[in-house]
Image (spheres, rainbow, N blue to C red):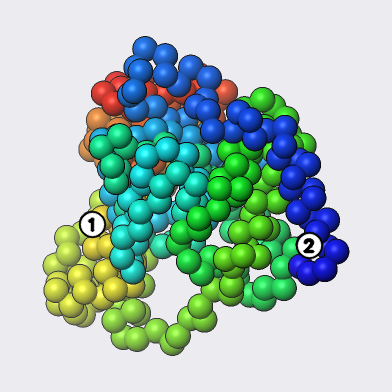
Amino acid sequence: MTGSGAGDARGAEDAVAAGARARADGAPPGAHSGRKGGEWARHWQYAELPGLDLLRARYIRHFFPRHSHDGYVLGAVTGGIERVGLPDGVTDAGHGGLVMINPEVPHTAQAGAPEGWAYATLYPAERLVADIAAETTGLTGTAAFTEPLADDPYAVHLVNGVHRAAEEGNALAADSLLRIVVARLLRRHGGPAPTRTPASAGARTAERARALLEARLTAPPTLEQVARELGTSPFALLRAFKNAYGMPPHAWLTDARVRRARRLLETGMAPAEAAVAVGFTDQPHLNRHFTRIVGVPPGAYRRERAGGARTYKTAGERAS
């Protein structure tokens, strides 16, 4: 976008964001109730913004193990330091920093300072980002963010504005701010996703192993059994799988089970039933892995989808 169009868009950004900026960096209502200085999180969906998940949280001891998302991650840090482990190395994001992660990119996250970190995160679906890219940029093919971190306090304000507007039920502002911030980041930090090279023999083996694990999610075979079925060795399979997906098969399997559990919880299924349906031994097993990867317990996640309570403590919560 160039010339007067860019100026008009910037003017629209200023006008739409102005009303939200003053309160954008605050925690959700009730977040500090009873736990001053403690961890809190809210992971939810706003019905007026289909294709988007929202997370606002403060974490101190919480560690996100290596996992990936089927959509994009836009995390605006509002306090402390978030340390993100990516395939190319570790990135520290402080106040005013915005972390950008593309779909299916494995990553970890943890505090990079004793006080932890606070952030507001948007998880837009691929289709939503593709629509915004087609309308506002000249990008062809699948849009991707070409760098993991932007020092962009204004974009952080916009992300917080999306959260605040959604929390207040202001659909027009929330939708407008969402599209403005995604377009801004795509213009400044976007590019076409890398073209896939022809799959090597190792990559084809990893893809077959992934399909096998997906088909047997509730009763997966051992590494040796998978390797034997695919005509390779266990260590060769480990190397190929990690090269292709950024994590070993057992970690990928846990991530896949949590993703499927999320979809089941969104339909209203009880956590205990979802645990069995995705292959966890029991609900505590689901609680542990779900909370580590998603950032909130499965009971809290399900209640939000049912329009329940607003904010949930993450330290020591006993999920229902």
**Pick the front one: 307 or 272:** 307
Which residue in the protein does label 2 denote?
Answer: 6
**Quarter the C terminus occupies:** top left
**Tag in front: 1 or 2:** 2
- Does residue 3 show up? yes
Spot occupied by residue 177 in the image (x, y as percentages of width and height): 69, 44
Spot occupied by residue 223 in the image (x, y as percentages of width and height): 17, 64
- Does residue 289 show up? no
- Report whether 224 appears left or right of 196: left
In the rendered image, the vertical position of residue 271 relative to residue 80, given as above or below: above
Classify 10 Å Cα crowding around label 1: few (below 14), some (14-19), many (20 and above). Answer: some
The amino acid pointed to by label 1 is His
Spot occupied by residue 244 in the image (x, y as percentages of width and height): 33, 72
Q: Are marks 1 and 2 in contact (CB under 8 Å)?
A: no
In the rendered image, the vertical position of residue 202 relative to residue 111, given as above or below: below
Which quarter of the picture shows residue 115?
A: top left
Q: At x 74% / y 45%, what residue is drawn? A: 14
Q: At x 67% / y 41%, what residue is drawn? A: 49
CA gap, disc 1 and disc 2: 47 Å
Q: At x 65% / y 51%, what residue is drawn? A: 181
- Report whether 305 appears left or right of 300: right
Which residue in the protein does label 1 denote?
Answer: 250
**Quarter the N terminus occupies:** bottom right
Q: How many marks?
A: 2
